[in-house]
Amino acid sequence: MAKASSSPTEPRDLAVEAFAAVAEASEHGELLDADRFAGLLLRAGGLEEPALPRDAWFGRVIDIGTLVAQAGRVWSMA
């Protein structure tokens, strides 16, 4: 997962953390459930949100049900 900030005053990049979580799940062959993936989408934010499902789908960390469940929300935030 992405490196945590080294001090409390250093800002965290939540989008980077979300993409790192998807990459880590892919490396371990882990399938993320809909709730976990929805939380990662919130971290990614509107600008990065469309790319996260693509990475998760092609990394095989979400199933079609999770993708479909989030598609409308992602589309509206893009």
Image (tube, rainbow, N blue to C red):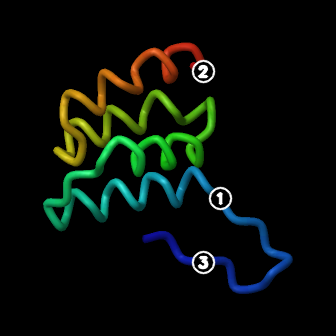
Foreground residue, 38 or 58? Answer: 38
The amino acid on which the numbered mark 3 sits, given as a three-letter code, is Ala
Quarter occupied by the C terminus: top right
Secondary structure of the residue carrying numbered label 1? loop
Q: Which residue sits at x=51%, y=48%?
A: 39
Q: Which residue is mark 3?
A: 4
Instruction: Identify the residue shown where x is 29% and y is 42%.
Output: 56
| Mark number, residue 77 | 2
Q: Quadrant of the N terminus?
A: bottom left
Q: What residue appears at the point 46 percent right and 27 percent down from the top-left corner?
A: 50
* Quarter of the image where one finds residue 23: bottom left
- Identity of the amino acid at label 1? Asp
Q: Between marks 3 and 1, how big is the CA–CA gap?
A: 9 Å
> What's under tag 2, amino acid-wise?
Met
Outermost residue, right side: 9
User: Can you say whether 9 is above or below 16 in the image?
Assistant: below
Q: Secondary structure at mark 2?
A: helix
Q: Position of residue 17 (x, y in %)?
A: 52, 60
Query: Residue 34 occupies which quadrant of the picture?
Result: top left
Mark 3 vs mark 2: which is more N-terminal? 3
The residue closer to the viewer here, 30 or 18, is 30
Earlier-in-chain disc, 3 versus 1 = 3
Q: Position of residue 35 (x, y in %)?
A: 41, 45
Residue position marked by numbered label 1 in the rendering = 13
